[in-house]
Image (cartoon, rainbow, N blue to C red):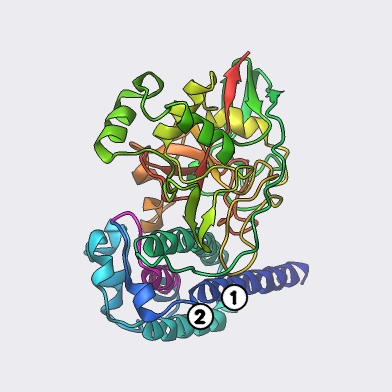
Amino acid sequence: MATRRHAEQLDTTLSARLAATRALTLALAAPLSDADATVQPNPDASPAKWHLAHTTWFFETFVLRDHVPGYQLHDERFPFLFNSYYEGEGERHVRAKRGLISRPSLDEVRTWRGAVDAALSAALSSLPAPVLALIELGIQHEQQHQELFLTDILATFAENPIEPAYGALGPAACLATEPLTWLPGREGVVEIGAAPGGASTKPGTGFAFDCERPRHRALLHPYAIANRCITNGEWADFIADGGYEAPSHWLSEGWDWVQREGIKAPLYWHGDGSAFTLAGRREVDRSAPVTHVSLFEADAFARWAGARLPTEAEWEDAFASADPRLGHQLDRAGPVLPQPGGGPFGDGWQWTASAFLPYPGFAPAAGTVGEYNGKFMSGQSVLKGASCATPRGHSRASYRNFFPPAARWQFTGVRLAQDR
């Protein structure tokens, strides 16, 4: 009886979290027109409508189709349109042409979402534990797409010459910048990665993706890590000092990228001291953490500053005891912006010097969902922390975000480290 009560309580909690996650995605889309939600600003970003549809496809495919007897797909054409990269699910629409999917309409996607949500709710109490784990994975997957939703709509509106705002925000905080100091890190053998069955140093707690495991030992040499991230004001000093014009600061590939693309400042910055944001064009807040910079830029800034980027092991060990629910993160639908005075989690993801590679003994999740992380362990760099667009509670010290080194349409920033 006690076991059954525990299972019922778990199902109720999971059901509430599932409903809240699905509702937040709809709320994020509420200010958009069908046209807003259809545009794809570049091949790396996806239309808002596609995010709503893809997260629905995930639940319909891996939970309802595969584990609910008698379930019929809402529309047999949708899997081809809204599969992302799962080879095990067959052919799919070309990623760079997602913006050409004018039909189904935004309202039709919302109707599909409602039907899938109703089917999930009806089936939840009868699903076995392994399938409940798939629902948990689906929740975490949708939270990732909520962040992508915001960064992609920012990229979409930035392409519009009239610079529409996704929503309104109050005036910039413009606080005094906390002095940059150095926090000595531990040295010697430490453990990093998600604990067995969990996401933190407390075994058996929380969720973790397969790429965060297994927990393993890492050797740390004497180092120190900065107490805060680099600010917009400090980045402006880097620009003023010719940081984008001095090849000595840059990796060879980064210097080629800067020259080829004509990069002179973080993405969305303008020469008049303003930047485009989800709240429209605003004056750059010099006290807020800089974001929308690539690994190439982060590494160049670190060299200019006489420092370096932390490794993922250094970052994770330094902030393993920090509360990942604190900081400026996504709490509700609406525009977001990095704010001054945050901690290690929030405002902007922080580039590390580590490549996204498998941990010793890594094994991808079983089945087609095992394509989720392991297949991308080439040419990607690890970022740690969280951003202002990360749903609160989604991240943790062991979390391994990853992007190619030239990517900067995400809220990506910089925390320095140094040898000591």
- Residue at mark 2: 117
The quadrant where residue 337 appears: bottom right
Q: Nearer the viewer, residue 337 or 122?
A: 337
* Residue sitting nearer the eye, 254 or 143: 254
Magenta highlight range: 43-63
64 drawn magenta: no
Q: Amino acid at mark 2?
A: Asp
Residue 369 seen in this snapshot: yes
Q: Is residue 360 visible?
A: no
Instruction: Count neighbours of disc 1 (C-alpha within 10 A) and say few if under 14, some if 14 to 19, many if 20 or more.
Output: some
Q: Is residue 257 above or below residue 69?
A: above
* Residue 364 coordinates in the image, percent (x, y): 42, 46
Image quarter of the C terminus: top right
**Kind of residue sitting beneath label 1:** Ala
Residue displayed at 33% across by 83% down: 105
Q: Is residue 388 left or right of residue 142?
A: right
Mark-to-mark CA distance, 2 and 1: 8 Å
Whichever of callouts 2 and 1 sits on the residue coming sooner in the sequence is 1
The residue lying at 55 percent from left, 84 percent from top is 122
User: Tags 2 and 1 in contact by the CB under 8 Å rule?
Assistant: yes
Indicate whether residue 62 is drawn in magenta. Answer: yes
Q: Of the numbered discs in the image, which one, if any, rests on residue 19?
A: 1
* Residue 302 vertical position relative to residue 383 in the rendered view, above or below: above
In this picture, residue 82 sits left or right of residue 343: left
